[in-house]
Amino acid sequence: MANRLADETSPYLLQHKDNPVDWYPWGEEALSRAREEDKPVLLSVGYSACHWCHVMERESFEDAATAGIMNEHFVNIKVDREERPDIDSIYMSALQAMTRGGGWPMTVFMTPDGAPFYAGTYFPPVPSRGLPSFQQLLVSLADAYENRREDVLQSAASVRDYLQSSTGAAIPRAETAGAELLDAAAGSLVAQIDRRFGGFGGAPKFPQAMNLEVLLRHHHRTGDRSALDGVELTLRQMANGGIYDQLGGGFARYSVDEYWLVPHFEKMLYDNALLSRLYLETYQATGDPFYRRIAEETLDYVLCDMTSDEGGFYAAEDADSEGVEGKFYVWTPDEIEAVLEPEDTKLALRYWDVTERGNFEGKNILNVPRPPEAVADEFGVSPQELWERIVRIRSRLLAEREKRVRPGRDEKVLGSWNGLMLRSFALASRVLDRDDYREAAERNAAFLLEKLKSDGRLRRSYKDGRARFNGYLEDYAMVADGLVALYEATFETRWLLEADALCEAISELFWDEGSKAFYDTPADHEKLVTRPRDIYDNAAPSGTSVTVEVLLKLALLLDRNDYRQRAESVLEELSGGLEKLPGAFGRLLCALDFSLGQPREIALVGDPDAPDTQALVSAIYARYLPNKVVAGRAPDDEEAAGLIPLLADRPMRDGRATAYVCEGYACKTPTTDPEELAEQLAG
């Protein structure tokens, strides 16, 4: 018989609905039972694309004997970390403090009032590698709670004190400021680049798109070639490696090795949102079509495999299919030979390095270890002809792969991750002149505002017609950021007004004037062991970092000095973190670069669909200009002129679309010539 998780919408929780464990979702019902029965709480946190979460479920949560111990001695709560980042953040901080490590599945034992006294990650079914079996751990902790209660409560009290003090702790101010701080941060990141394989550090290796964006901005600002070299090396190595899906597009979450070959095969929406934008911006900065291709393939993957009929973007795809990690993606030479003609088989095996021995458990993860030019020369064809053949071969292999059992897909729609993807599609619609990308962005924005927003409040998650959970700071900030990008791509004022409304809500619900900080949960959120405030940019940017950046943009677009002051106060409060730990503040460093960079304010007046207006827009998006805002209106749109100060009192010249460029309180000569506009933006 199904447990209480059967009524949930999270695919991760639903995966556990038939476990013999008496699971509860997080909520007062479970905590009340723990208090009434004087039992400790076993909190298990994971997510649907997590390989080791699936392993622990098969080994322990589906085992009747293990479930019996859990049900007898504990109140058991299962949490999807993607639905409840507040729970995940609080207890991950506890786990890291107690063990100096972290990860998922996260296993936390706590008192009925939510204070943790023991924590870990995966526990095996039998003792292994210095870890007790999960059953041994359960029995030991149940005994401790029953017979050594004072020790347990003392441990829980110390962890609670740590969590509460660390949430409110101030960071010492930086000793440097301004461009000097940015240069030092970029220098630190450049020094960490792996000059052989790209990326930062060794295995396991994560993409770290935000830190690469810091280096791209640094090169743009200073001309430092080593920063751009580090970005280009990393992006090429990743795109040629197994972390990139060579047939279907899109990036896996990370590589288990230092050279990007063997991925942890799950694909996360946030990674593909951040990386598609980074590849787009690197294309703008370099003009190299390689980066354009990877951006397009990644966005096309999201459109094809990660977009709902309603316009929302799904959260993730699993690493596993048929219970085997990576099975969907790997190939043998025989499997390729069965699909292709002999000459194409030879080319495919060489191009993607497919061998009888294999590179992953006897099979092959497709990757491109050799320069395509060298492969073309080996086969006596031009690089162009080689690529044309690879495109045809790839299409046939992809069609064959589609006959396989696909990995599971987490079809919940998360506000924050959708906001990240919305920004990428909006930017790509202009950089790549793709109407389908603009339409995808518009559908997504309309979906988010219709399904996740009600009475001025955002919800976190949507699935099966149900919007659930309070929106967190990151949801408000990232959706607002995506809406600003969509406004800049379309000049439809409704998107800008919706972004402004979300930022007003951020000020009301998340801002703490005393500490000059944003909390992650709204002021009327349920009371937890502490009110979380996660300021670090990890796999995805923090809500704080994105809020600062979007406030700075709206300050320029809407002449909101209060937004600017709030953003700058946060940058000042966190300056010490930017100085001491630049690798943990990539997105906030980008916001600081925007704040210091005298952003260009670009206003266009002209018929949005007319060729002369489009030519000016193309001139703007043809180059990498990270510190800019763009506003536009039709010549007779007085409403937009009244709402957006940048557009006020700015007529067309000689009946032609006209661009106005201002920077640092000074404006250049209005122009109707795309080439002159390009020169103004290059200056």
Image (tube, grey):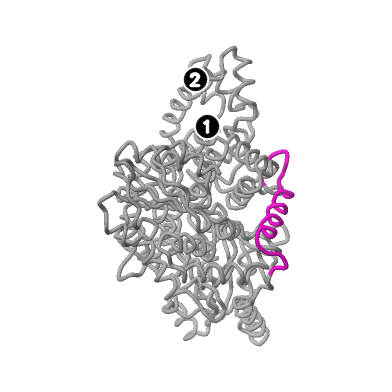
Name the residue tied to disc 1.
Answer: 289
Residue 3 position, x and y percent, is 40, 67
Task: Out of 674 and 223, give the one closest to the viewer.
Answer: 674
Mark 1: few/some/many CA within 10 Å (<14, 14-19, 20+): few
Query: Pointer 2 and pointer 1: residues touching (CB < 8 Å)?
Result: no
Q: Residue at x 50, y 55 (%)?
A: 666
Residue 660 position, x and y percent, is 42, 49
- Give the magenta part as a residue range: 174-199
- Residue 422 in sight in this render: no
Can you tell which quarter of the image residue 287 is in?
Answer: top right
Residue 228 position, x and y percent, is 65, 42
Residue 208 position, x and y percent, is 61, 51
- Residue 331 in sight in this render: yes
- Label 1 sits on what residue type? Pro
Give the left or right position of residue 559, taking residue 117 as reference. Answer: left
Residue 166 vs 502, above or below: the answer is below
Q: Residue furthest left?
A: 636
| Callout in the foreground (2, 1) | 1
Q: Residue at x 55, y 52 (%)?
A: 51
Residue 323 vs 31, above or below: the answer is above
Task: Out of 281 and 604, give the one closest to the viewer.
Answer: 604
Residue 53 vs 119, above or below: the answer is above
Q: The residue tagged with tag 1: helix, strand or loop?
A: helix
Within the magenta stretch, is there residue 112? no
Q: Residue furthest top?
A: 380
Give the left or right position of residue 234, taking residue 297 as reference. Answer: right
Q: Which mark is residue 521?
A: none
Q: The residue tagged with tag 2: helix, strand or loop?
A: helix
Q: Which mark is residue 389?
A: 2
Q: Residue at x 42, y 39 (%)?
A: 618
